[in-house]
Every structure is written in C-alpha cells, then in structure tokens.
Image (cartoon, rainbow, N blue to C red):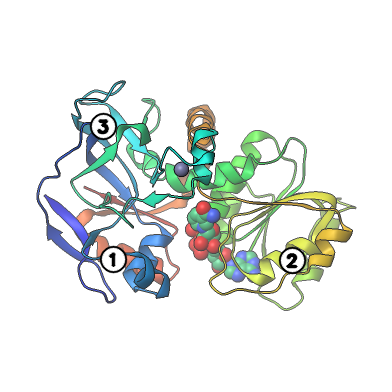
Amino acid sequence: MRCLKKQERKEGLWLDTAEHPQIKPHEILINVKRAAICGTDVHIYNWDEWSEKTVPTPMITGHEYSGVIAEVGSEVEGFKVGDRVTGEGHLVCGHCRNCRGGRQHLCRNTFGIGVNRPGAFADYFALPASNAFKLPDAITDETAAIMDPLGNAVHCALSFDLVGEDVLITGAGPIGIMAAAVCRHVGARHVVVTDVNDYRLGLAKQCGATVALNVAAPNSDELLHATMKNLGMTEGFDVGLEMSGHQSGLRDMLNSMNSGGRIAILGIPSTPFPIELDKIVFKGLTVKGIYGREMYETWYKMANMLVAGLQERIAPVITHRLPFENFEEGFQAMRKGEAVKVVLEL
Ligand code: NAD
Ligand code: ZN
C-alpha cells in the first residue's frame, strides 16, 4: 500500500510503500478515503525540536482522516466491514484515574496516531475499534476528515454557555475559524476573531465572525476597544477562546474581557511567555486549558451539529483538495500560510 512516511530525521516526508497492516483482535482496519494535513504534520515535516524529541522513525504520519472499514478484529463489536468512519486520534490507557473516571481526554498515558504509532497518511491503517466513530450519511468524506480539529474547536467552544454571549477568538487558524462557526451555530451574539493574516480573517468572516480584526499593528488594544464600542458592547467579552498560542493574543484577550469572564485556552505557545496574572485575579476570570476532544461527548455533539447545518458553515475552511501523490504541494501551501485545511484524496 501507499503511505507518507517520516523516513529520515530531517526536513521532509517521503511517499513510500508499506506492508498491508495486520490488525489485533480489538482493532479495525480502515481504508482511508480522505486525509487532512494538521499543523502537527507540518511540525513533523519541518522536523522541529518537538518532533525530534517525540517522533520515532520511520513513522507513517497523519491523524485527520475518514474512510471505510475493510476488516474487523475478532473481538470487535458494533462495527462491520463497509461502515464509514473517522476516529479519535488520541489512544488512551484505560486504567489511569482519569480514564476510569470517564475523562479519557485527560489520560496521562496518551498516544497519538501518526506521531507515536503508524497513522492515516496511508491506504490502510489499524485503529482500536473503541476510537472509531461511525459517520452519519449526511457528513461528507472531506468534512469527516477534519472532525479532529473541528473537535478541538467544539470542545473549546462548548466549555462555557455561549447563548447570547459576546465571544472573542484570538487566532484565525483552522481551529479558530471553525470555532467562530460553532459559536454562531450555538447562539452567541457577537463573535469577534483576531489574527495578523487578512486571508485567514476573510475566511473567519465567511464562517460567521461578526467582525474579523487584524491586530498586527501595535495599537491592537485600541482597535479591539473601538470594535467593541461599534458593536455596542459596553463592558467587555463574556467568553474568550485563545487559539493563537501567541503572547499578544492572550494579552489582547485579558485586556478586553469583562469581569467574571470565562476563557478557554487551546493555543500552544512555541516558547514560554509571561502572563499578566493580575488581570486574571482582579477581573475574577475563569481560565480552562483545553486538550484534544472529550471522548466521546465532543464527537456526538459535533456530528449532530454538522448534520444540523454546521457542515455548511465550516465549508470555506477547506481551501485545497489534492491527490495523495501531490502532498508536497499541500505541505508547501501550509508552510507558506497560503492554505487553511488541505484535504488529500486517496
Ligand atoms: P495555527 O497556527 O494555524 O493558527 C494560529 C493563528 O494565530 C495563525 O493564523 C496566526 O496568524 C495567528 N496569530 C499569530 N499571532 C496572533 C496574535 N497576536 N493575535 C491573534 N492571532 C494571532 O493553528 P491551529 O491549527 O488553528 O491551532 C490553533 C492553536 O492551537 C495552535 O497554537 C496549536 O498549536 C494549538 N492546538 C492545540 C491543541 C490542543 O489540544 N490543545 C490541538 C491542536 C492545536
Ligand atoms: Zn489513561
């Protein structure tokens, strides 16, 4: 079968062939139809410090996908050959306190497909059946291939009550853009999205942002406050979703939150930075870190929202569709910031 591999411990990915995978009794074999490129895959392509520390080689990469079940292990129940599926990319231990308490997204022994074990940039890959998610007919193969990052957005956005609330999203990457769509879908009032990239801000607007604001200028504070005034917001944002991983994104947020506001932080800083703790204290803010997706509450809510109109709202986020062999074009577009979601067709 064809696969995309981290072959050598240096920049790049290699199109190669591999043996047809053998499944264990609790696993299913997925015939991948669509696979999407994640920021994590770009890190692995670039072979940054994190990848060097984390990824054993050779490794078939990729963890955003959809496909059809080609084989089921002897102990698997609830799935059959031919089912359309996507799945959770975090594999959990099942025996730590959080796993046993039903909080698998907080498992301390998490493994990632396409990072620590062979992933989805391949014609076939093996997945524990417990991680698979059966797709409703109304969800297309390409939408299903981005349910992993959409799940990050959903997990983050549904952390707090959004109905009638004013929301600030810092960072219009794929996850921030999709989070704007989710906030509108569940009934937020104003959804303001910030970024430093006009192309991405344009897509955030298409996906439902009330205002998409470029904060590249040093007076981002003034711009945000003027925006709030124009929208008739006198007190500040009720909910903040930090999706940039940048110090200035979080700083803008802390400056424009209302007292008692609630913040969910998804963005991962590439280098540590100081935080104005006094703002969190004096404003009485609630701050929640978000990792992955809730297993499997996020998946159920996400699927049902997609069927109920969210699929159309997030459609503009898929900016590139390419044959699997043209992966290099997709990676280069991602590296140059000219793409948001790239879907590879197998
Ligand atoms: P991304 O890197 O594509 O998006 C980040 C965006 O922030 C970019 O568009 C960038 O231009 C923008 N940005 C830069 N400086 C900014 C500023 N000062 N203000 C506002 N925006 C600014 O990433 P993504 O794939 O959308 O993911 C969002 C973040 O979440 C990243 O930091 C990523 O590492 C992280 N992430 C976390 C999890 C998790 O489970 N916690 C999962 C996936 C991704
Ligand atoms: Zn665990």
Secondary structure of the residue carrying numbered label 2: helix
Marked residue nearer the N-terminal end (3 or 2): 3
Marked residue nearer the N-terminal end (1 or 3): 3
Q: CA distance from mark 3 to mark 2?
A: 47 Å
Foreground tag (1 vs 3): 3
Residue 192, how many percent across, how many down? 70, 54
- Categorize mark 1 by other alpha carbons within 10 Å: few (<14), some (14-19), many (20+): some
Q: Is there CB contact under 8 Å for labels 3 and 2?
A: no
Q: Residue at x 11, y 49 (%)?
A: 1
Q: Mark 2 highlights which residue? A: 252
Marked residue nearer the N-terminal end (1 or 2): 2
Residue 165, how many percent across, how many down? 77, 41
Q: Residue at x 24, y 23 (%)?
A: 80
- Categorize mark 3 by other alpha carbons within 10 Å: few (<14), some (14-19), many (20+): some
Tell me: is circle 1 under 8 Å from ligand 1: no
Q: Residue 329: which numbered mark, if any?
A: 1
Q: Mark 3 highlights which residue? A: 26
Tell me: is circle 2 under 8 Å from ligand 1: yes
Q: CA distance from mark 1 to mark 2?
A: 34 Å
